[in-house]
Amino acid sequence: MPRYYQVYSSLQDRIRAGEFEPGAALPSERQLVKDYGVSRITIIKAMDLLEHDNLIEKQQGRGSFVTGCRQSDDGALGCRVAFCMPDFGDSYIVSVLIGAARMAMRQGVQLQIVGVESEEREASRIREAIESGANGLLVFPRSRYADSGLYGDLCERGFPLVLLDRYFPQYDTDWVTFDDEGAGYALTRHLISRGHRRIAIFPGHEVMVTSVHGRIQGYRRALEETGIPFDEDLICLDVYDTLSPATINANESSHLRLFDRIRRDAITAMVAINDFVALQMNLDLMKIRNEMMRAVIEGRSGLMVDEPGVEIAAISHRSLGTDQSSLVVLAIQSGETMGERAMDVLVRRMAAGDDLPHQRVVIPMEVVPVA
């Protein structure tokens, strides 16, 4: 490796090992030249890399000082954490932010909110936050992981990072999730206990994320343990494939797709992967019933079938309205709890560095029958 990179790696290791405390001055360039037996330009290149990683701060006429979390006499940490939000319109993500902000205030941590308007800008927004001086990251990754390699790079550098709600199996990083498989399992078992055998599960626009995979895995396990054959066609990817919190009730044809699915596959119960799928599903069932009633009144036969008395189980971060609802059971995920736990993990990571084993926090959901 180039000499400047060897010096950079050595100084990085010494900083992370605590040889130079946050706020402490590094040896002068002249001293480093002597210590490492290299030229001044080599030291300058190494210091530039340390500054790029926000490990040091150069002060004109004074030298270079170690950045990072500074602990005050009352135990508060003088860190800045960036919370990267993909969608300000999603009330679940906002609840996670509230929990993180509450824990940040307790810990004396400054919280910076970074909006990610599109998946293509996720990586650039995160890099900007780091370059502006963030000491750690709380990230709710976008659904399609436009630049997941960024997280691999951050892991290799040892940058404090906690992933929220979903994670990358290929990278060793801290993450906080819910017990998604357990929730999918519990909801499906509840529907089975109510006599259902044709149970479908409905994802929204996010499919390729670990949280959705876990919920589907729990659904499948519940079916197989009770002797009900698992049918891949009952993972209904084609009904709400474009549904997001911003598009609820905006699609005029989703109720027709749902009706076709219910009739074609003889579905009697449905698992909604999240609350906005559950809300759209309930609206669509109401539209179907209204269409059927209108067909009866007008004497049309196109929708003259038995009313779809379908029951819904859903995962949600809040209680859902039950007026004219087919909802029978909820698995509640507390976004505020997730935010608090994630901030706590990140603060401990920033304080301990690589000495702390990777933290993998799984939060259980409360399963609540709906009266």
Image (tube, rainbow, N blue to C red):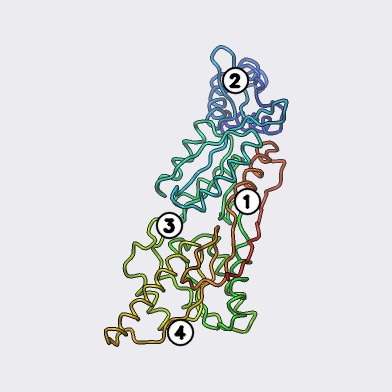
Nearer-N-terminus badge (1/2): 2
Identity, as a three-letter code, of the amino acid under mark 4: Ala
At which x and y percent is residue 329? 57, 70
Q: Quadrant of the C terminus?
A: bottom right
Nearer-N-terminus badge (4/3): 3
**Cα–Cα span, label 1 and label 3:** 21 Å
- SS under mark 3: helix
Nearer-N-terminus badge (4/1): 4
Q: Where 358 falls versus 369 (above or below)?
A: above
Nearer-N-terminus badge (1/3): 3
**Cα–Cα span, label 4 and label 3:** 28 Å
Label 4 sits on residue: 266
Q: Are marks 4 and 1 in contact (CB under 8 Å)?
A: no
Label 2 sits on residue: 64
10 Å neighbourhood of mark 2: few (<14), some, or many (≥20)? many
At which x and y percent is residue 260? 37, 79
Viewer-nearest of labels 4 and 2? 4
**Closer to the camera, 130 or 310?**
310
Q: Which mark is residue 245?
A: 3
Nearer-N-terminus badge (2/3): 2
